[in-house]
Structure formats: structure tokens, C-alpha cells
Image (tube, rainbow, N blue to C red):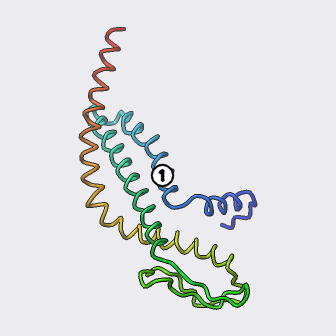
Amino acid sequence: MIVDNKFLINAVEWAGKKINSPQQRFILGLSAIAIQPVIDFTNRNVDKDTREVSAARTSAKIIAGTSVGVFVRWACIKAVKAFSGYKLEKDGEKITGISKKTPKDIFTPVLSTITDDLTAENFKHRYGNHVKNLGSILATLVMIGTNFLIDVPLTVYLTNTFTKFVKAFDIKAKEVKNES
């Protein structure tokens, strides 16, 4: 499929430039928390207890996964930026070389081909993309560990808390219904 709709192309380009990885994960979490627990809670193909626990567990998984995902992505992007200082070697406006600012700058971008048209402004754009992309890749690797170390225990804790809340909410709803 070839997309040639200018509006759609511009919208996708805008979103790619303006919405970073942590923000994308947050948006995904918001849409999930608004829809998935409701689907689980209203599923009439299972008994009431299963619906309640399922809605609580789904909510817990979404909240834990979104919270940890947003934080890890944000932290990794910040870490890459903190450890990617650079010095530009220039000839007038054109960049002729890029080097690490300090020995701690392990994520400094190395542009293997420095083109004739690479200026400080072009480099800032490419550097910004480098930091975001490398930070997102690093976050993906870090999240392999955080899934087991943080997400799972947090999901269990939140599931237990939310299950009590859902059951208490259901009891209050029945009391209100019986009083009317």
C-alpha cells in the first residue's frame, strides 16, 4: 500500500516529530485504561467474580505497565543525552568532525560520513533524533528486566487492591439499588 494523501503524510510526520516515545506509551496506556477494563467488567460470558477480578487485573497491568514504561523510556532518553556530549570541529559553518566532550560520553554519535552540507543546525536535528532513538532502544532492553523486577510485583499488588475496591463498589451499588 502506498500512502499518498498529503494530510495523512503530514499528520504522521508531525506526530513523529512532536510525540516522543514516553508520550506515545502514555497515550497508549490512557486509551487502554479507558476501554479494556470496561470490556472485561461487562463480559457476560463469564461469572461475576471472574469479571471483577479480570477488570481489576487488566487495570493493574495497564497502570503498572504504563507507569514503568513511561518512566523507563524517559529516564533512558535522559541518560543517553547526559552521556552523549560532543565537540564539533568546524570549517566555517560546515562540520568536519565530531568527537566526545569527555570520556564519560559513551553515547556520542559518530557520523561515519560527514557530508559537505552538514552544518551545526543540521547536526542538532540529527543529534536530537540520535538521542531519542538510542534512548528508546536502550529503554526496550532495560524493560526486559523491569518487566520481571517491577511490573509483575506491582501488578500483583495493584490487582489485589483493585479487586477489593471492585468488590466493595459492587456491594455499594447493590445497596443503593436495593434502597431505591
Residue under label 1, please give it.
26
- Give the total of numbered labels: 1
Q: Position of residue 174 (x, y in %)?
A: 31, 18
Above or below, 104 relative to 77? below
Asked which quadrant contains residue 116, the reply is bottom right
Q: Position of residue 113 (x, y in %)?
A: 62, 90
Q: Nearer the viewer, residue 8 or 82?
A: 82
| Residue in view at x 31 percent, y 26 percent | 169
Above or below, 13 relative to 93? above
Mark 1 Cα-neighbour bin, 10 Å: few <14, some 14–19, many ≥20 = some
Above or below, 152 relative to 115? above
Above or below, 111 relative to 18? below
| Residue in view at x 52 percent, y 56 percent | 24
At label 1, the amino acid type is: Phe
| Residue in view at x 62 percent, y 89 percent | 89
Q: Quadrant of the C terminus?
A: top left
Q: Position of residue 41 (x, y in %)?
A: 36, 35
Residue found farthest to the right: 6
| Residue in view at x 71 percent, y 60 percent | 10
State the SS at label 1.
Answer: helix
Q: Quadrant of the N terminus?
A: bottom right
Left or right, 176 with respect to 3, comes to left
Q: Nearer the viewer, residue 99 or 139?
A: 99
Left or right, 96 with respect to 52, comes to right
Asked which quadrant contains residue 54, the reply is top left
Q: Position of residue 16 (x, y in %)?
A: 61, 63
